[in-house]
C-alpha cells in the first residue's frame, strides 16, 4: 500500500465549477501537508501548506486536513481555465512524500 | 525570485551510456534534491544533499549517484543508463531548516533511454 494515495483523474470541469481534489494517507506520523501545482512542461510549485486539522483559505483555494480520517482535500472555487494543471498532494515527515497527482482541466 | 535551472529539457541516450544531469540554483540554498516523476507514481526522491560534498539516499537510489562539489550545483549521474530510467527528472532546492521550507523546482529534464 502506498503511503499517499491520490486519484489521478483526469478531471474535467466547466469554468466556474467547484473542484475537489483529495488524498488519503496511511502514515499518521506525517506532520505537514502541502499542495503543489504543476503546469505542463514546468516543475511543481507550492500552492498551499498547512499542518493542523481544519481549513486554510487563500483566495479561491481552500486546503482541508482531517488527521483523524487521514484525509486531505484541496477545493478550488470559481475554477478558471488557468487552473488547468496537475495537482500534487505532498506530506512531510523528514522528507516529502508525494501523491500521484491529479490532472485537472477547466474548459471555458 | 528563486531560480532552479536544469542543463537540458530533453535528452536522448542509449542503453549503457553514462548520463549527467546538472542542476543549478541561484538562491544560496543549502538543500538540493533529485526526483523522478512517472505517470501513476508521482514524484519519487532519488538523492538529496544538505551541504557541499554531502549526500543522502532517497527512496530509489539504485542505478544513480550524485555529486555536490559546489553549493549551487547538484549533479545526478546515471552510471550505465537503462530503459527503465526513462523518466522526467526534477531538481529542487530549499533553505536549511526543519524540513518545512518550500522546495523550489526546476523545469525538469525529460530523459529517453533507447
Image (tube, rainbow, N blue to C red):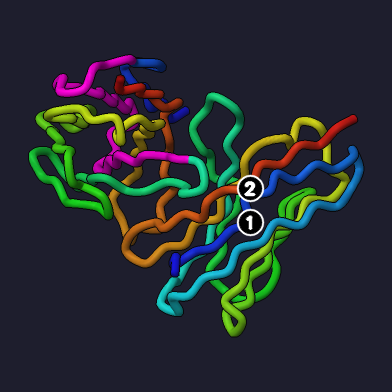
- The answer to which image quadrant residue B93 occupies is top left
- How many other residues sit within 10 Å of disc 1, few (<14), some (14-19) or many (≥20)? some
Q: Is residue A66 above or below residue B101?
A: below
Label 2 to label 1, Cα distance in Å?
6 Å
Q: Position of residue A68 (x, y in %)?
A: 59, 84
Q: Nearer the viewer, residue B80 or A41?
A: B80
- How many other residues sit within 10 Å of disc 2, few (<14), some (14-19) or many (≥20)? many
Q: Is residue A61 left or right of residue B97?
A: right
In this view, the residue farthest toward the bottom is A68
Q: Chain of mark 1?
A: A
Q: Position of residue A33 (x, y in %)?
A: 52, 63
Q: Is residue A51 above or below residue A47?
A: below
Q: Chain of mark 2?
A: A
Label located before the other in sequence (2 or 1): 1
Residue at the (18%, 32%) spot, across then down: B71
- The answer to which image quadrant residue A94 occupies is bottom left
Q: Position of residue B33 (x, y in %)?
A: 29, 42
Residue position for label 2: A102
Res. A7 mark: 1
In magenta stretch: residue B37: yes
Q: Is residue B35 left or right of residue A79?
A: left
Badge 2 element = strand
Q: Are marks 2 and 1 in contact (CB under 8 Å)?
A: yes
Residue at the (68%, 67%) spot, across then down: A64
Q: Nearer the viewer, residue B3 or A98?
A: A98
Q: Is residue B4 left or right of residue B83?
A: right
Residue at the (11%, 45%) spot, across then down: B54
Q: Which residues are magenta?
A: B12-38
Amino acid at each position: 500500500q502506498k503511503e499517499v494515495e491520490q486519484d489521478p483523474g483526469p478531471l474535467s470541469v466547466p469554468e466556474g465549477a467547484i473542484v475537489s481534489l483529495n488524498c488519503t494517507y496511511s502514515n499518521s506520523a506525517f506532520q505537514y501537508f502541502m499542495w503543489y501545482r504543476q503546469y505542463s512542461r514546468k516543475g511543481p510549485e507550492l500552492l498551499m501548506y498547512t499542518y493542523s486539522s481544519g481549513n486554510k483559505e487563500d483566495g479561491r483555494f481552500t486546503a482541508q486536513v482531517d488527521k483523524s480520517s487521514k484525509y486531505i482535500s484541496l477545493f478550488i472555487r470559481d475554477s478558471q481555465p488557468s487552473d488547468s494543471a496537475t495537482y500534487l498532494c505532498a506530506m512531510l515527515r523528514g522528507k516529502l512524500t508525494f501523491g500521484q497527482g491529479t490532472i485537472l482541466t477547466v474548459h471555458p | 525570485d528563486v531560480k532552479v535551472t536544469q542543463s537540458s529539457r530533453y535528452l536522448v541516450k542509449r542503453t549503457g551510456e553514462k548520463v549527467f544531469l546538472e542542476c543549478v540554483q541561484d538562491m544560496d540554498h543549502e538543500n538540493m534534491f533529485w526526483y523522478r516523476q512517472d505517470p501513476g507514481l508521482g514524484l519519487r526522491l532519488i538523492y538529496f544533499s544538505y551541504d557541499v560534498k554531502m549526500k543522502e539516499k532517497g527512496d530509489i537510489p539504485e542505478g544513480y549517484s550524485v555529486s555536490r562539489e559546489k553549493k549551487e550545483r547538484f549533479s545526478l549521474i546515471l552510471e550505465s543508463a537503462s530503459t527503465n530510467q526513462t523518466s522526467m527528472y526534477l531538481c529542487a532546492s530549499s533553505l536549511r531548516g526543519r524540513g518545512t521550507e518550500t522546495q523550489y523546482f526546476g523545469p525538469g529534464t525529460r530523459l529517453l533511454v533507447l
